[in-house]
Image (cartoon, rainbow, N blue to C red):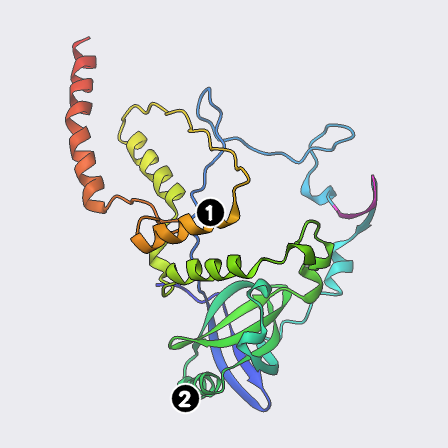
């Protein structure tokens, strides 16, 4: 069972809804430790001064902000604590806006809000009111020691809150080089074929369809190595370099393949089921036993 990481309330107007905050995501990244290849010992990192080469204890470490190359302004913990936002334990909603007005680029991390004891009715009321109106609440709250801009919105049976980036944290597209100019406007025939190709590949979004094939392959490799199987790394296939093609020909061929069902959708690969993986492990077991017996006879 997940455990709440924060408790407080949603505040809008004179209404307060006590809630508990839960993580809404669970990243599955494969994490590795750094080991010494000679003896398998864990690698320890030390805080070493770049000037004298000596290890520095925590009590002699201060924070520094680089204002120019090699020039720093230092601040103390006490100076920073003076600006630490007061933990009010409240998500203060300041505005309600239409969901479609928020570009997904502004979203950072997402959490679930669950009603605290005795708050089910006001929680359900806020959930239904936001669902019917199509509005999301924009406000601020303090999590640990940092103040966040956040969007509160209905998501399924729950309320979700997503921390957001501030406007100056999103890169202005005017700073990007190489975006198409007016001269790159597509011809009408090309546009019609591109729209047909998009429609031929259109479907409902199913997040379970898309797999992290790299993570699956790494976990399978680790499982095989943990079972004692010797692994022979296959040379990586060299990716073909991209080349400029005739746009109309490429669109026509892509559209024809999509209509025939020959073109796999982006990200679609053949994934082995759990039953297939179990069968593969069973098939490998006799080979491992023969290898072990051979070593024993030697």
The residue wearing badge 2 is: 121
Quarter that holds the C terminus: top left
Mark 2 vs mark 1, foreground winner is: 1
Q: Is residue 158 above or below residue 232?
A: below
Residue 90 picture location, percent across and down: 58, 77
Residue 271 to residue 187: above or below: above
Q: Nearer the viewer, residue 101 or 188?
A: 188
Q: Do we see residue 288 in this rendering?
A: yes
**Disc 1 secondary structure class:** helix
The quarter of the displayed image where residue 114 is located: bottom left
Which one is in front, 234 or 261? 261
Question: Which residue reaches farthest front?
Answer: 189
Residue farthest top in this picture: 298
Main secondary structure of the magenta stretch: strand
**Residue, disc 1:** 250
Give the residues drawn in magenta, as a range: 62-69
Question: Quick one: label 1, few (<14), some, or many (20+) residues within 10 Å?
Answer: few
Mark 2 secondary-structure assignment: helix
Please state if 57 lies on the left or on the right of 34 as rendered. Answer: right
Question: Could you give the CA–CA distance between mark 2 and mark 1, rounded to whole angstroms?
Answer: 57 Å
Q: Residue shown at 35%/62% (left/top)?
A: 206
Quadrant into which the N terminus falls = bottom left
Residue at horizontal 45 percent and vertical 83 percent from the top: 131
């Amino acid at each position: 069972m997940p455990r709440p990481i924060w408790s407080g309330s949603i505040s809008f107007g004179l209404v307060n809804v006590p809630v508990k905050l839960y993580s809404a995501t669970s990243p599955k990244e494969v994490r590795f430790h750094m080991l010494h290849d000679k003896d398998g010992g864990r690698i320890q990192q030390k805080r070493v001064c770049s000037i004298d080469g000596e290890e520095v204890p925590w009590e002699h470490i201060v924070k520094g902000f680089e204002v120019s190359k090699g020039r720093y302004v230092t601040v103390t913990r006490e100076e920073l604590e003076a600006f630490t936002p007061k933990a009010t334990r409240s998500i203060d909603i300041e505005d309600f806006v239409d969901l479609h007005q928020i570009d997904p680029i502004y979203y950072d991390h997402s959490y679930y809000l669950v009603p605290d004891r005795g708050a089910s009715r006001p929680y359900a009321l806020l959930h239904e009111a936001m669902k019917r109106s199509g509005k999301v609440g924009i406000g601020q709250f303090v999590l640990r020691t940092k103040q966040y801009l956040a969007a509160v919105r209905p998501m399924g049976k729950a309320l979700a809150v997503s921390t957001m980036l501030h406007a100056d944290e999103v890169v202005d597209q005017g700073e990007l080089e190489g975006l198409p100019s007016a001269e790159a406007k597509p011809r009408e025939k090309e546009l019609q074929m591109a729209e047909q190709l998009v429609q031929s590949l259109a479907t409902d979004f199913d997040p379970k369809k898309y797999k992290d094939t790299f993570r699956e392959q790494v976990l399978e490799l680790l499982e095989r190595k943990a079972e004692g199987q010797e692994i022979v790394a296959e040379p990586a296939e060299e990716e073909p370099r991209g080349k400029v093609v005739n746009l109309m020909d490429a669109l026509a061929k892509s559209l024809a393949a999509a209509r025939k069902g020959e073109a796999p959708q982006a990200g679609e690969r053949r994934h082995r089921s759990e039953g297939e993986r179990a069968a593969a492990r069973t098939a490998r077991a006799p080979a491992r036993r023969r290898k072990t017996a051979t070593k024993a006879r030697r």
